[in-house]
């Protein structure tokens, strides 16, 4: 299915303080998840959904990102000399994966500000935003589904995940109502009636959390431009989306796609370790040896 949307924006300017000292001199997006940097999974996901034009919003100390998606002549020549075509292919794959552009965020004013920086590149067309802390399993093509819903409803679309109420304060939380069904199998689509960025612990708004995938209409830029700093003193994308959701006459409002597939959080250390184990267990080259070892190891834990 062909979509008119071609551009993906990946905010990657964060300092990665939760992973210090690993991130002292290296961007957190380059932390390996098994044997690939986290950022490559995200770019692969965008490309798999047909979005080959990728804009990364970066900052200081992020040159490793540019190097990763660029040629590395010396290494390529060395692998060629050795006839190591398998590794050469791995090296070239990330170079040729997408058309990657880079823009520095400048002032670290929050996710909303990072997205607003994409305005000149994106222009007046809908676009996707992918946050690097959330990895979506390639077997569960969430972004493709969101692009489809965006095309059907000509609105903005966010990804939602049902979370335990005790976790709600870690996310943007959505209140929703049923959306009019457009096609059979539309039961994963809801209309957003309200959004709150990281509500105080114990607030019971809903159990639907925003995960880091958005397909946005360009009207979001004007709204972001007017959005005052919110939670943490930062310009929040969630707050701008709340404004958009409140008045569907501006740009069709906001819809949510409830994701029931496999998602791996790499945002903090514990989740990152879990993500690596989950992904490695499923790998054909590593899983068969890792699985029995894990079972044996876990039996020693008590
Ligand atoms: C961001 C968003 C939040 C969303 C989360 C998903 O927060 O602001 O609404 O729920 O990503 O990962 P962050 O985790 O970057 O603080």
Image (cartoon, helix red, strand yellow):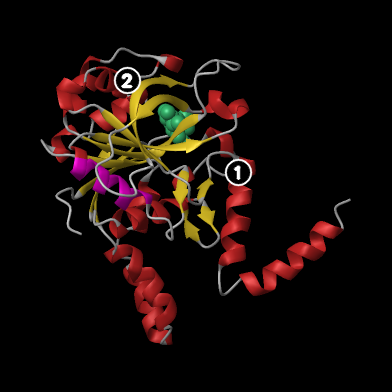
**Residue in the foreground of this view, choosing between 301 and 54:** 301
User: Residue under circle 2?
Assistant: 242
- 141 versus 190 height, above or below: below
The secondary structure making up most of the magenta span is helix
Does the image show residue 22? yes
Mark 2 or mark 1, earlier in chain: 2
> Where does residue 288 sit, x and y in percent of width and height?
65, 74
Instruction: Tell me the element at label 1.
Output: helix
- 253 versus 188 height, above or below: above
What is the C-alpha distance between the residues marked 2 and 1? 28 Å
> Where does residue 199 sit, x and y in percent of width and height?
50, 18
Q: Quadrant of residue 109?
A: top left
Q: Residue at x 43, y 80 (%)?
A: 86
Q: Residue at x 54, y 33 (%)?
A: 17
- 110 versus 97 height, above or below: above
Q: Residue at x 32, y 20 (%)?
A: 242
| Numbered disc total | 2
User: Residue under circle 1?
Assistant: 271
Q: Residue at x 10, y 35 (%)?
A: 124
Q: Quadrant of the N terminus?
A: bottom left
């Amino acid at each position: 299915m062909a979509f008119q949307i071609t551009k993906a924006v990946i905010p990657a300017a964060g300092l990665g303080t939760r992973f210090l000292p690993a991130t002292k001199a290296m961007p957190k997006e380059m932390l390996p998840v098994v044997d690939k940097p986290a950022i490559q999974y995200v770019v692969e996901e965008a490309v798999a959904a047909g979005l080959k034009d990728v804009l990364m919003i970066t900052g200081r100390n992020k040159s490793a990102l540019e190097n990763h998606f660029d040629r590395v002549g010396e290494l390529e020549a060395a692998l060629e000399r050795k006839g190591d075509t398998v590794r050469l292919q791995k090296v070239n794959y990330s170079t040729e994966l997408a058309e990657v552009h880079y823009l520095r965020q400048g002032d670290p004013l929050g996710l909303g500000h990072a997205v607003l920086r994409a305005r000149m590149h994106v222009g007046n067309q809908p676009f996707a935003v992918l946050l690097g802390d959330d990895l979506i399993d390639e077997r569960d093509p969430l972004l493709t589904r969101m692009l489809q819903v965006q095309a059907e409803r000509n609105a903005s679309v966010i990804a939602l995940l049902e979370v335990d109420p005790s976790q709600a304060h870690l996310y943007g939380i959505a209140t929703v109502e049923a959306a009019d069904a457009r096609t059979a199998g539309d039961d994963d689509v809801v209309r957003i009636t309200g959004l709150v960025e990281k509500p105080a612990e114990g607030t019971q708004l809903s159990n639907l959390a925003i995960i880091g995938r958005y397909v946005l209409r360009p009207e979001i830029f004007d709204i972001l431009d007017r959005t005052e700093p919110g939670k943490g003193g930062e310009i929040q994308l969630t707050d701008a989306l709340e404004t958009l959701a409140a008045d569907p006459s501006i740009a069709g409002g906001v819809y949510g796609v409830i994701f029931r597939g496999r998602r791996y959080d790499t945002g903090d250390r514990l989740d990152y370790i879990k993500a690596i184990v989950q992904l490695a267990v499923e790998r054909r080259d590593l899983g068969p040896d890792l699985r029995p070892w894990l079972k044996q190891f876990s039996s020693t834990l008590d």
